[in-house]
């Protein structure tokens, strides 16, 4: 699909960078053409500019984020108020539960992992830091969707589910239940054999408290039996404590 007619020059650069950031490995020109929808001549111009500025590097015809992209990532790790406010609570939850804990946000209809604290078990479940998955299934996605403002939630679901009215109706009902309960739970919805519980983190804004992040605890389904309510309670308490810290700053 060619995206050029409604896309500005700056947006073409961002399309290329976003494709490289979300792919998880080096991309060929064919990969990038399919992901960005740009014409080949346009794509080559964007790549040349990004290479010149150090945002993209090339090796044997494959492209990946360059050194300046790494500097941006390091700056984010050091300066993100959300990550900094969440780290200690995440570590405490991981120690108490002995399971993996992640901090996730919603962006461009995807769930993106900003930070991870790994379980000490050799058999463990986690997002990779920086990994993105569609905003459609799993505890992380549903906890983020459930607490979006009503209009934004409806617009997001329209895009994500498209003509699937049956799936849309089912998740609408489930999101209402999650909002009432305060957290989302899933089992094997994204990765087989992975159980997860996710609770929203609220930040202060001009419109009041808004939830654009969640704390998610992940564990093998086989290790969770009998612990579901305790793990959900701990995760919810952790999310509440991080929210209180963010809103006090």
Image (cartoon, rainbow, N blue to C red):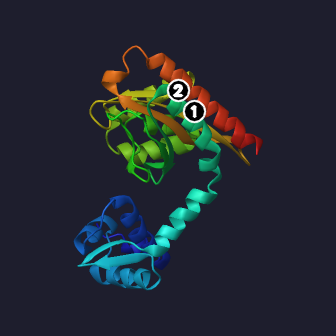
Name the residue carrying label 1. 92
Q: As rendered, which of 212 and 167 lies closer to the eye?
A: 212
Please rate how many residues cluster around mark 1, counting C-alpha atoms within 10 Å: few if below 14, some from 14 to 19, many from 20: some
**Quadrant of the image occupied by residue 57:** bottom left
Instruction: Give x and y (percent) for residue 45.
Output: 37, 85
Relative to 68, is 126 above or below? above
Q: How many marks?
A: 2
Q: As rendered, which of 120 and 63 lies closer to the eye?
A: 120
Q: Are marks 1 and 2 in contact (CB under 8 Å)?
A: yes
Secondary structure at badge 2 equals: helix
Please rate how many residues cluster around mark 2, counting C-alpha atoms within 10 Å: few if below 14, some from 14 to 19, many from 20: few
Relative to 177, is 199 above or below? below
Question: Looking at the rendered structure, which numbered label has been put on residue 96?
Answer: 2
Q: As rendered, which of 73 and 45 lies closer to the eye?
A: 73
Q: Residue furthest top?
A: 226
Residue occupying image coordinates x 38% and y 46%? 160
Residue 179 visible in the picture? no
Secondary structure at badge 1 equals: helix
**Is 63 left, or right, of 70 in this rendering?**
left
Instruction: Give x and y (percent) for residue 34.
Output: 26, 66
């Amino acid at each position: 699909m060619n995206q050029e007619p409604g896309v500005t020059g700056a947006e073409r650069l961002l399309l290329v960078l976003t494709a490289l950031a979300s792919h998880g490995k080096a991309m060929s020109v064919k990969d990038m053409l399919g992901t960005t929808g740009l014409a080949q001549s346009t794509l080559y111009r964007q790549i040349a500019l990004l290479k010149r500025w150090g945002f993209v590097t090339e090796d044997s015809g494959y492209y990946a984020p360059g050194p300046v992209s790494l500097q941006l990532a390091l700056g984010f790790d050091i300066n993100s108020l959300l990550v900094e406010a969440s780290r200690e609570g995440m570590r405490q939850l991981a120690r108490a539960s002995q399971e993996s804990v992640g901090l996730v946000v919603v962006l461009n209809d995807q769930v993106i992992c900003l930070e991870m604290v790994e379980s000490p078990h050799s058999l463990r479940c986690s997002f990779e830091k920086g990994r993105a998955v569609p905003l459609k299934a799993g505890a992380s996605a549903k906890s983020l969707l459930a607490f979006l403002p009503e209009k934004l939630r409806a617009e997001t679901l329209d895009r994500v589910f498209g003509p699937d009215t049956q799936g849309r109706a089912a998740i609408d009902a489930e999101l209402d239940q999650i909002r009432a309960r305060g957290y989302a739970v899933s089992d094997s919805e994204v990765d087989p054999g992975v159980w997860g519980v996710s609770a929203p983190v609220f930040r202060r804004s001009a419109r009041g408290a808004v939830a654009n992040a969640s704390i998610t605890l992940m564990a093998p389904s086989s290790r969770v039996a009998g612990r579901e309510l305790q793990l959900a309670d701990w995760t919810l308490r952790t999310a509440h404590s991080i929210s209180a810290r963010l809103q006090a700053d």
